[in-house]
Image: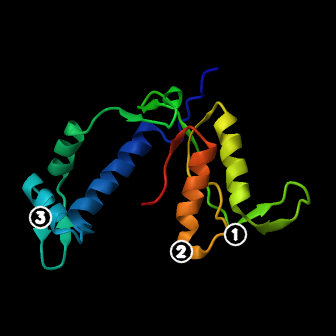
Amino acid sequence: MSKPRISFLSESEIEAIHDASLRVLDKTGIKVMSKPALDILKKAGAKVDYETGHVSIPRNVVAEALKMAPKTVKYCARNPRYDFVLNKQETHFCAEGGPPFVLDWETGKRRYSTSEDIAQCATIADYLDHVDLIWPLGAGSDVPAPMRYIVDMCTSLRNCEKHFEGDA
């Protein structure tokens, strides 16, 4: 079964967004707190203020970086049969969320999500042909807050063989 190709913007709208982004990078700039990153940006041709971390990136610097960027990126999954290539020709779908609440499947009532909900959602995502990658699909309220994200990631990974992403 082939996946649908989705297009929300026209080429002219995409160009307008790109042009506005280039203006922001050049005129407004960004703040970078990493000295190694500032060094890389300066070497590439950006205007760098090491004291404030302010960086202005001219259009030509962005254009050169885009020329060097790969045209495709391979996303690897736990099971290689779910690996896929991200490119401009195909649409890929991600099951993501991290909602603090769920509707209980048995009672229909709203409640805090648990690790078991995350496991069930990851298992469902694993079986859905059109889902290519997942993020943790809940926020396990049954786990102490300092450990929650790590446990949510582990629960997701144990229950889904597809490409997984999460916050570092």
Q: Which mark is residue 146?
A: 2
Identity of the amino acid at label 3? Lys
Q: Is residue 2 above or below residue 82?
A: above
Query: Which tag is nearer the camera, tag 3 or tag 2?
Result: 2
Residue drawn at x 55%, y 38% is: 162
Which mark is nearer the camera, 3 or 1?
1
- Please state the horizontal and vertical placement of residue 29, each as a whole percent of the image: 24, 66
The answer for how far apart the CA atoms under marks 2 and 1 are is 12 Å
Task: Out of 162 and 8, give the one closest to the viewer.
Answer: 162
Q: Spatial distance from mark 3 to mark 2, Cα to Cα?
A: 39 Å
Label ID, residue 162: none
28 relative to 152 in the view: left or right: left
Q: Secondary structure at mark 1?
A: loop
Tell me the SS state at disc 2.
helix
Q: Which mark is residue 142?
A: 1
Vertical position of residue 2 compared to residue 112: above or below: above
Taking depth in this image into account, of 1 and 106 the one nearest to the observer is 106
| Amino acid residing under circle 1 | Asp
**Which amino acid type is shown beneath numbered disc 2?**
Pro
Disc 1 residue crowd, few under 14, some 14–19, many 20+, Cα 10 Å: few
Badge 3 marks a residue whose secondary structure is strand
Residue where numbered disc 3 is placed: 47
* Mark closer to the chain start, 3 or 1: 3
Residue 144: x and y in percent read 61, 74
Q: Quadrant of the C terminus?
A: bottom left
Seen from this angle, which residue lies furthest bottom? Answer: 51
Please tell me in which quadrant of the rendered image residue 86 appears.
Answer: top left
Alpha carbon distance from label 3 to label 1: 48 Å
Q: Quadrant of residue 145?
A: bottom right
Q: Is residue 74 left or right of residue 80?
A: left
